[in-house]
Image (cartoon, rainbow, N blue to C red):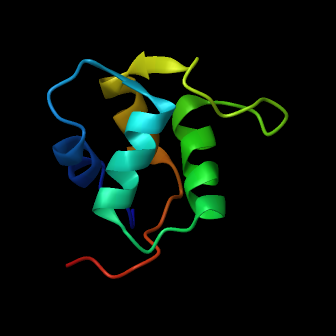
Amino acid sequence: MCFHPEDVAMHSGHCRVVTVEELRQALLATDPETDSKHSDIILRWAFDISSSEPLDNAYVRPLDAVLARLQFGNICRTGRKP
């Protein structure tokens, strides 16, 4: 695994659920070099949203479920880990 969910969790605060925008902000804080295309792919995977559906904050998922999907997905960082 190239992308560590623990890094994202650290930037997600102590919430039990997460929205698309909250996860987007956590991803950008974790890997600032991620472009919007790559972050959209990650968000769609994490929230299990098909490419035909819009990415918006209507999607709210338990943080544990989102982190589990990130952990087992083939998701890599864009930039180097500090």
Residue 40 against residue 68 in the figure, above or below: below
| Residue located at (60% from left, 60% from top) | 36
| Residue at 30% across, 48% down | 5
9 or 29, nearer to the observer? 29
Please state the horizontal and vertical placement of residue 57, each as a whole percent of the image: 54, 24
**Residue 72 % position (x, y):** 45, 45
Q: How many marks?
A: 0
Report the quarter where the C terminus lies: bottom left
Residue sitting farthest toward the right? 52
For this view, does 72 lie left or right of residue 57? left
Query: Would you place residue 61 above or below residue 13 in this image?
Result: above
Q: Residue at x 38, y 53 (%)?
A: 27
Identify the image quadrant of residue 1: bottom left
Percent x, y for residue 49?
68, 30
On the image, the x and y values in percent for residue 79 come to 40, 79
Residue 45, located in which quarter of the rendered image?
top right
Q: Is residue 69 above or below residue 33?
A: above
Q: Quadrant of residue 61?
A: top left
